Amino acid sequence: MNTTKRIVAAGLVAVVLTLIGVLGVAHAQSAPMTDDQITRIKANCTSAKNTLNQLHASDALLRVNRGQIYESMSTKLMIRFNDRVSSNRLNADDLVTVTQTYTATLTTFRLDYQAYEEQLSKALNIDCSKEPVAFYDAVASSRTKRTQVHTDVVKLHQHIDDYKLTVDSFELAFNAKGTN
């Protein structure tokens, strides 16, 4: 798994560096692109599209694998443990609260990833040799949406950590009751 993460990370770094080189320095949406920037996009159109296609494929695979893991965390671990605690007439309120927050963030992750994937597909469907400005803007929008997906992933990991801490607190309270 660590090897896969390293490969994906290295690939993403390569994509970012390539896109920076192809698209040049980011411009404000209101500032018009220079002729030099437009020329660079046209000249490197094939390379940029190939890089984006590779990113699209690797992100899709990563999304499926990660999505399954995140889903399993919720359905096979959190919800089942919460149900078990509740069925034993123990207080699972804190566990349920963290699980609900995690589930809401997972739903947001799915929606944000779908928006990112759709935007990246739109960018890939633009002929950058004929419409370099539209291509650049579509890639910039994709980048923004991808950043949101990353933020969602960070939140999911934080909720996983919160759930672990909540389970640890539950365990301490349970053990303290058992010794009294």
Image (cartoon, rainbow, N blue to C red):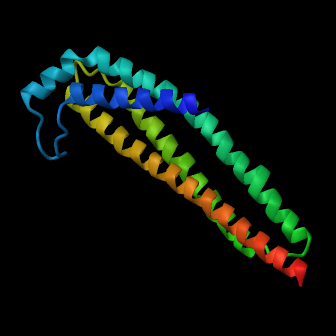
69 left or right of 122 in image: right
Please tell me which residue is depicted at 35% across the width and 40% down the height of the picture. Answer: 143
Give 77 or 57, whichever is nearer the viewer: 77
Query: Residue 63: where, in percent of width, then height?
Result: 57, 36
Query: Residue 54: where, in percent of width, then height?
Result: 44, 22
Please tell me which residue is depicted at 89% across the width and 85% down the height of the picture. Answer: 180
Which image quadrant is residue 121 in? top left
Query: Residue 18: where, in percent of width, then height?
Result: 29, 25
Residue 121 visible to the viewer: no
Residue sticking out furthest to the bottom: 180
127 left or right of 148 in image: left
Residue 82 visible to the viewer: yes
Give 131 or 146, whichever is nearer the viewer: 146
Residue sticking out furthest to the right: 88
> Compared with residue 65, is residue 132 higher up or lower down, i.e. above or below?
above
Please tell me which residue is depicted at 19% across the width and 45% down the height of the picture. Answer: 29
Q: How many marks?
A: 0
